Image (cartoon, rainbow, N blue to C red):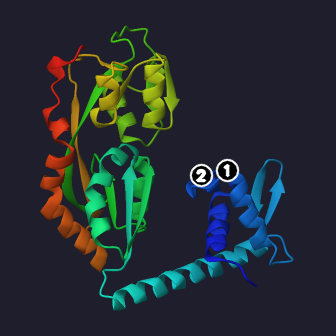
Amino acid sequence: MNFTLHQLRIFIEVARQENITKAAENMYMTQPALSIQLKKFQSHFNIALFEKIGKRIYITDFGRSLLEIAKNILAEADNLKYKTREYEGLLTGKLWISSASTGKYVIPYFLSEFINKHNGIDLNLDVSNKTQVINSLRLNKIDFAIVSTIPGNIKVHEEQLLENQLFLVSGTGNDSNKSQLIYREEGSATRTAMEQYFGTPDKRKSIELTSNEAVKQAVIAKLGISILPLIGIKNEILQNQLKIIPSPGLPIVTNWRMIWLKEKKLSPIAEAYLDFIRTEKHGIIEKYFQWFKAFDLDKLDI
């Protein structure tokens, strides 16, 4: 057998998604390129790894029996890489972070200097909705979670990062009682904020979308109005694509924060990153988010 580690990663991701398109997206590959590599990996075995039923694919019993072996091979390959770096005097290993979706506008700036400084660290950053992020934290699959509100059902430590302001916005600047409300999906912190302000979706004509980007584009297209975090709509406001609707009780103000389980023993890498955040976060805010602190809503055409 002469398969590659890359083919193993593709096999694992396809098995996880049971969907070629999603696997290709997650691996930043085109669907044809991923399919070619998957076929090459399959060619080493006389028994099918997957079967197609209708439009869906399913991992076979044989494929499932190989899955843990494939994961173990990749884990040992990582150990080999990290051990080499360790002997070179580098901080090595993986840093596992999961961020609520709007956190993608925040967390990269709190990571770049640290990751660039420590070449031996591999970053695994998953961006999802709040419910999935908290579930990953609860199951101890990650080192840190990036959220705007602290979950009430698990014990965590926290390190505050940046203020989060949510405003009511539209593509026209007007809001009537007939305006359609555009909600995020269940489990999103932005969805919770909207429900606290407007009530549940069934009380007013509404639609539901699965990302803040989708909501933002729908509002720009004048499909309705929504409550969105300022940090994700700065450019659209300055370009007059979105308008903030002055509303009593808004903005809703929370804080982006990094949380981790109280009982978790942090790895050396996680400890190093936490020390970095505590030491450097104010400088990062001044460098990258000064616009956010000084954003003068009174000067905008709202």
Q: Quadrant of the N terminus?
A: bottom right
Foreground of the two, 259 or 76:
76
Residue topped by disc 1? 21
**Residue 64's spot in the image, x, y percent?**
71, 73
Q: Residues within 10 Å of mark 1 (few under 14, many from 20)?
A: some
Q: Is residue 226 visible?
A: yes
| Residue 236 picture quarter | top left
Query: Circles 1 and 2: CB distance less than 8 Å?
Result: yes
Q: Which mark is residue 136?
A: none
Label 2, secondary structure: give it: helix
Residue shown at the point (19%, 66%) measured from the top left: 276
Going by the image, does 221 lie left or right of 250? right
Residue underneath mark 2: 25
- For the point 42% across and 27% down, the residue is 200
The part of the image, by quadrant, that contains residue 253 is top left
Real-space Cα separation, disc 1 to disc 2, in angstroms: 6 Å
- Name the residue type under label 1: Thr
